[in-house]
């Protein structure tokens, strides 16, 4: 008889349609190992504020999904790694949260987590003076069950870690300068610093013209805009991202998912471009077109996108 649970490790899955985006999808299977995973309920703050180092914290809520509404989870373990311009630290165990601290979230056991910057820096032995804009703290979490089994990103299905299930095994906290929601948003005109160079390869990486820049949930500094990739050749509508990190702006990696038979064409970030966070009239994005050419025999080619506010 078929059973219905939430996590499948190492076997094929059949998806049930889920019309309500707030409900966890259900997986149907014959023979599988029952596991558990943390599902993101609410991302309260997803970055560290360099203007408030002593008061800044990452905050989020997760619920634990298993066969018994999260009651099989005995511990929530958080590990951390520091990757900075001035100092880097290997992965350490940062915190263990016991079952006695769990609360209820939408019918499942879970927990609200706060990770103060000063506390995690102290765990690494890193002084505040050693930090810099753009430093990243990477977190990896593990659920320990009552019977001793452990589940992390290393032994969970990629499906569970995807957007549908909101699996929240891993995440990062970036040290940055938060922006107001109405800054670096709105209608911009996309052009190129060197139009001839921009068309090298198959054509423009993204079509010139008007685009709408919007915020990305969970971050005050990341922005996205819609663009037409390889206009006149492929012409697909894509979402592109960039990050304003205090005094520089960085284009975020874009994987087209298409190629010439050997992987896919990837556009990567070029050198960070200077920016004044008090003036959102012009955004400069340095990119490396065909950072991976997907077997098409092109590039890599450095190009510069200019976004000018209307």
Image: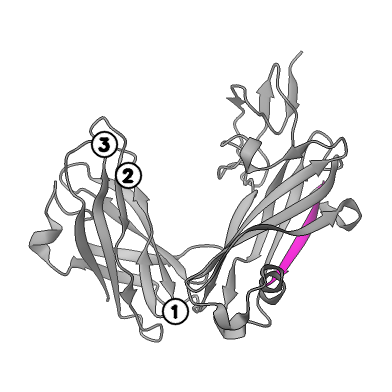
Left or right of 191 in this view: 90? right
Q: Quadrant of residue 218?
A: bottom right
Q: What's the magenta bit mostly, secondary-structure-wise?
A: strand
Nearest the viewer among 290 and 278 is 290
Residues in magenta, as a range = 107-116
Q: Secondary structure at mark 2?
A: loop
Which of the numbered marks, if any, corresponds to residue 121? none
Instruction: State yes or no: residue 248 in magenta.
Output: no
Which of the numbered marks, if any, corresponds to residue 246? 1
Residue 130 x/y as whole percent: 56, 79
Q: Nearer the viewer, mark 1 or mark 2?
A: 1
Q: Assess whether mark 2 and mark 1 are in contact (beta carbons under 8 angstroms).
A: no
Residue 48 x/y as whole percent: 59, 73
Q: Is 13 located above or below residue 132 in the figure?
A: above
The residues tagged by marks 1 and 2 sit, at their Cα atoms, a distance apart of 28 Å
Tag 1 or tag 3, which sits nearer the N-term?
Answer: 1
Q: Assess whether mark 2 and mark 3 are in contact (beta carbons under 8 angstroms).
A: yes
Are there few (<14), some (14-19), or many (20+) residues within 10 Å of tag 3?
some
Disc 2: which residue:
256
Residue 15 x/y as whole percent: 59, 28
Disc 3: which residue:
259
Are there few (<14), some (14-19), or many (20+) residues within 10 Å of tag 1?
some
On the rendered image, what quadrant is the C terminus found in?
bottom left
Identify the residue at image location x=22%, y=53%: 205
Q: Secondary structure at mark 3?
A: loop
């Amino acid at each position: 008889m078929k059973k219905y649970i939430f996590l499948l490790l190492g076997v094929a899955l059949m998806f049930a349609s889920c019309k309500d985006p707030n409900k966890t999808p259900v997986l149907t299977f014959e023979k599988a190992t029952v596991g558990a995973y943390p599902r993101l309920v609410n991302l309260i703050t997803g970055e560290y504020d360099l203007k408030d180092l002593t008061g800044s914290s990452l905050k989020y809520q997760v619920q634990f999904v298993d066969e018994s509404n999260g009651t099989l989870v005995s511990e929530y373990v958080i590990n951390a790694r520091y990757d900075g311009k001035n100092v880097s630290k290997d992965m350490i165990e940062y915190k263990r949260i016991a079952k006695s601290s769990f609360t209820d979230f939408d019918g499942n056991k879970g927990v609200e987590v706060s990770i103060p910057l000063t506390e995690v820096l102290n765990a690494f032995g890193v002084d505040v003076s050693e930090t810099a804009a753009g430093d990243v703290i990477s977190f990896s979490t593990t659920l320990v069950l009552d019977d001793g089994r452990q589940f992390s990103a290393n032994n969970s299905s990629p499906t569970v870690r995807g957007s549908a299930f909101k699996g929240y095994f891993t995440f990062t906290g970036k040290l940055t300068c938060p922006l107001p929601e109405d800054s670096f948003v709105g209608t911009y005109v996309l052009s190129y610093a060197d139009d001839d160079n921009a068309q090298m390869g198959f054509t423009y990486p993204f079509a010139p013209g008007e685009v709408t820049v919007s915020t990305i949930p969970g971050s005050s500094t990341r922005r996205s805009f819609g663009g037409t990739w390889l206009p006149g050749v492929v012409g697909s509508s894509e979402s592109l991202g960039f990050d304003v990190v205090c005094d520089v702006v960085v284009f975020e990696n874009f994987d087209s998912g298409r190629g010439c038979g050997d992987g896919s064409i990837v556009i990567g970030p070029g050198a960070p471009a200077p920016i004044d966070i008090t003036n959102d009239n012009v955004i400069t994005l340095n990119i490396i077109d065909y950072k991976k050419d997907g077997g098409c025999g092109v590039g890599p080619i450095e190009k510069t996108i200019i976004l000018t506010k209307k």
